[in-house]
Amino acid sequence: MKKALFYMLSCVLLIALTACGASESSSNSSNSGVTDTGIAPAAEIIIKATDYSFDQQEYRITKGVPVKIVFENEKGNHGVMIPGLNIQLSAKKSSTVITPDETGEYEIICSVFCGSGHGGMVSKLIVE
Ligand SMILES: [Cu+2]
């Protein structure tokens, strides 16, 4: 009897989880409060990567303003990953448009294992 109850409960839980996931993806936004809508950007930043750093320590963007984030590989083979905003850029997909709707600081790291200096490729994206 207890077993059956547990089974039922886990079923309900699973359904709840699935429903939650579905509604999240249908609203086309991540849980970070950022939307990638493909709308025209009002600002642009370029993040350039070399062996083994990004060209700036900090990149600043403005809350509520659609911004195009462009990644350029100047030397070596790198990528940009901003886990807090669900952003991943590489030579393949080198730009994206986001509209940040929360202020904050987000870590920018290299997404390609590029060599000895890989771990040190860290910059900051600041939403003001
Ligand atoms: Cu790297």
Image (tube, helix red, strand yellow):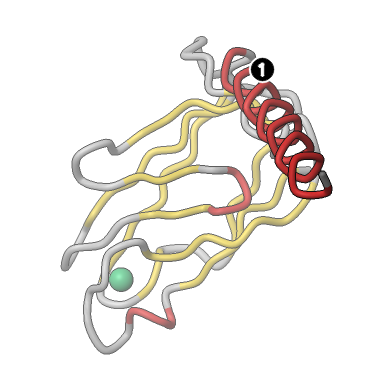
Residue in view at x 43 percent, y 82 percent? 120
Above-or-below relation of 52 to 88:
below
Q: Quadrant of ligand 1?
A: bottom left
Residue 13: where, in percent of width, then height?
74, 35
Q: Residue furthest front?
A: 1
The answer to which of 76 and 10 lies nearer the viewer is: 10
The answer to which of 80 and 16 lies nearer the viewer is: 16
| Left or right, residue 7 beside residue 29 | right
Residue 37: where, in percent of width, then height?
53, 15
Residue 75: where, in percent of width, then height?
18, 65
Q: Which residue is mark 1?
A: 23
Instruction: Provide the secondary structure element on which disc 1 rests.
Output: helix
Q: Residue furthest bottom?
A: 116
Q: Residue furthest left?
A: 76
Residue in view at x 26 percent, y 89 percent? 116
Quadrant in which residue 98 is drawn: top right
Residue 107: where, in percent of width, then height?
60, 62
**Quadrant in which the N terminus appears:** top right
The answer to which of 121 and 28 lies nearer the viewer is: 28
Residue in view at x 31 percent, y 56 percent? 79
Q: Amino acid at mark 1?
A: Ser
Above-or-below relation of 55 to 94:
below
Quadrant in which residue 71 is drawn: top left
**Quadrant in which the C terminus appears:** top right
| Left or right, residue 28 beside residue 56 | right
Residue in view at x 44 percent, y 54 percent? 81
Q: Residues within 10 Å of mark 1 (few under 14, many from 20)?
A: few
The answer to which of 28 and 104 lies nearer the viewer is: 28
